[in-house]
Each structure stands twice: as structure tokens, then as C-alpha cells.
């Protein structure tokens, strides 16, 4: 069997123009091509659709009935094309985003700005530290921190992270401000302890002219397995923490935290967004990616 719409466009054009020649001109093909397409359609349907004379072409009774349905089908195709084009030009619809927990609070705090800018987009966040499968889990955008594994997904770099070491002003007033990483041994450090049981070391460069960071093991007074709790612990005055810069940008701006050892701060891993091939041009996806680049400062 041929394609469901094979010959339909030619038949509809002829039936409406009452002429093979005029239909061919409208379609931009030859009269012979139109005639063959209609003949194939009649053969497939097993019914005569058009009465042909030397002066005029008229739909048969069956042709008039079929024409009514063809017009409806072609109109639905036209509407479908318009809707598809709209998705590429107007940001609208549901957008499912997978991201690690460590980015969740930061993004949620900024979603009101995105929603105000794109009121027709509904965002569904899926927080997980495992690697999401875009197709299997119907994810539109997956945000990843760190090096990317080989993938068929399309990646866009959103920003660079930076390790910052921070503490509450009250803690520093009480315990003093360290000037070198070695002095952390005399301080209360709150350290991230991964769910796999690995205590994550801190990263520092040797000085402002050094670019290569190296890992420092600090003595942990408290260890936590949730990154955002490190920020909460620092604000509460429990000690010094090291986190990604974006995690404490608001707290630093409000003065709830102060950066220490700034000249030893080290670059962190990059942040990327992944989407399925062909989806980066869809308006709602493009809008989110542009917004994330703006918010993450790359």
C-alpha cells in the first residue's frame, strides 16, 4: 500500500480548481504528474473520484464525499505544521529538567524570573544525582556538573564553577580568619561526605599566580552528605566550608557569609546542559538554556 496521503494533495487541488492544468500550476508540477497521482489514488481506493471531459473536471459523488474528508485532513496537517513552527518560535508548553541536588536550590530560587519572562512555559524539575536518560525518561534538558561522558546528546556549556571557602562573620570574629590553607588545622571545618562514603578533599592553588589546584585534606569537625547543608551549617556558624561559588552567591551578597583564602581559590568543574539532537532549536529549550547561561555566568 502507498503512503496514506499519496495523491490526496493532487486530487484536492484538481477537484477545487476543476482543472488538471490549474492544479498543476498551483502545485508547481506538471499536469502529467498530477494526472498520474490522481489515477494512482483512484486505483488504490477502487473508485472513480473525478469525471473528466475535454472542457471540465467534476468530482463524482464519491469524489465529493472524499474531498470533504481530504480538506479536513489537510487542514489538520496545516494546523499541525503551524503548531510545530510555533514551538520553535514561541516558548510554551511543559519543560522537564533533570539536575543534581546540589543545583536544585540555586535554580528554584531563580525560577520566578524565568516564569515571569516565559509565562507559557511550565517547568517540571527532576532532582537526582544519578545520570538521567533523556529519551527513556522523557527529559528535555539534563544539567550535569563535571566532565561529560561520550553521548549522542547535544551539550551546551552553561558556566564554570569555582571553589570558594566561606564562613559566617560571627565564626571568624570568634576564631580568627585563616590566611593560608595550612592554618585550617586550627579551625572547625564542615566537610562534604559523599553518599558512597568518600570524604571529599578541599581544593586550593598555592597562590594567585598558580592555576593548578591540588587537594587538601582538612580535619572535619562535622561531615555532611548533602551539599546544601554545608551552606546552612556555615551560615549557622558551625565552621568553615568549601563549596561551589554559585551555591553561596546570595549569602555572600547579603553578608551572611564571608570568603576566606580567596587568593588560593581554585577553579572547579564546568556545568553543561544536555538535550536530545534536534531539540536545542525548540523555543522552550532554547529559552531555558539562554536563561541558565545568564544565571550561571558563562
Image (cartoon, grey):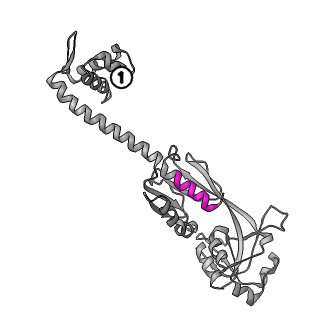
Q: In this view, does 123 lie above or below 67?
A: below
Q: Does the magenta stretch include residue 1?
A: no
What quarter of the picture does the C terminus occupy? bottom right
The residue depicted at 62 percent of the width and 85 percent of the height is 236
Residue tagged 1: 26
Q: In which quarter of the image is residue 198?
A: bottom right
Residue at the farthest top position: 54
Give the quarter of the image for residue 247.
bottom right
Q: Is residue 212 visible?
A: yes
Q: Nearer the viewer, residue 168 or 135?
A: 168
Residue situated in front as seen by the camera: 201 or 268: 268
Q: Which span of residues is magenta-colored? A: 286-296
Picture residue at 51% right of the left edge, 43% below the top: 278
The answer to which image quadrant residue 209 occupies is bottom right
- Name which residue lies at 52% across and 53% down: 287
Given residues 255 and 226, the one toward you in this image is: 255
Residue drawn where x is 59% and y is 50% of the image:
155
> What is the residue that sits farthest to the left in this orientation?
61
Secondary structure state at the residue bearing disc 1:
helix
Left/right of residue 228 with respect to residue 209 in the rendered view: left
Amino acid at each position: 500500500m502507498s503512503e496514506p496521503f499519496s495523491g490526496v494533495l493532487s486530487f484536492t487541488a484538481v477537484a477545487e480548481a476543476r482543472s488538471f492544468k490549474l492544479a498543476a500550476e498551483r502545485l508547481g508540477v506538471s499536469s502529467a504528474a498530477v494526472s498520474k497521482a490522481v489515477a494512482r489514488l483512484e486505483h488504490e481506493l477502487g473508485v472513480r473520484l473525478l469525471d473528466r471531459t475535454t472542457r471540465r473536471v467534476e468530482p463524482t459523488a464519491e469524489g465529493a464525499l472524499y474531498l470533504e474528508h481530504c480538506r479536513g485532513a489537510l487542514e489538520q496537517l496545516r494546523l499541525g505544521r503551524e503548531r510545530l513552527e510555533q514551538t520553535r518560535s514561541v516558548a510554551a508548553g511543559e519543560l522537564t529538567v533533570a539536575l543534581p541536588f546540589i543545583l536544585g536550590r540555586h535554580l528554584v530560587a531563580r525560577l520566578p524570573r524565568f516564569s515571569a519572562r516565559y509565562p507559557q512555559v511550565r517547568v517540571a524539575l527532576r532532582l537526582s544525582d544519578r545520570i538521567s536518560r533523556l529519551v527513556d525518561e522523557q527529559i528535555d534538558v539534563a544539567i550535569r556538573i563535571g566532565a561529560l561522558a561520550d553521548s549522542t546528546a547535544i551539550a551546551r556549556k552553561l558556566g564554570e564553577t569555582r571553589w570558594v571557602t566561606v564562613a559566617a562573620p560571627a565564626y571568624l570574629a570568634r576564631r580568627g580568619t585563616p590566611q593560608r590553607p595550612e592554618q585550617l588545622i586550627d579551625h572547625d571545618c564542615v566537610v562534604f561526605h559523599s553518599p558512597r562514603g568518600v570524604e571529599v578533599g578541599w581544593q586550593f592553588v598555592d597562590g594567585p599566580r598558580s592555576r593548578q589546584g591540588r587537594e587538601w585534606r582538612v580535619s572535619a569537625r562535622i561531615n555532611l552528605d548533602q551539599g546544601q547543608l554545608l551552606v546552612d551549617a556555615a551560615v549557622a556558624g558551625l565552621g568553615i566550608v568549601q563549596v561551589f561559588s554559585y551555591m553561596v552567591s546570595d549569602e555572600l551578597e547579603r553578608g551572611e557569609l564571608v570568603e576566606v583564602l580567596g587568593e588560593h581559590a581554585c577553579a572547579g568543574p564546568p556545568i553543561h546542559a544536555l538535550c536530545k539532537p534536534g531539540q536545542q532549536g525548540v523555543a522552550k529549550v532554547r529559552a531555558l538554556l539562554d536563561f541558565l547561561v545568564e544565571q550561571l555566568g558563562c
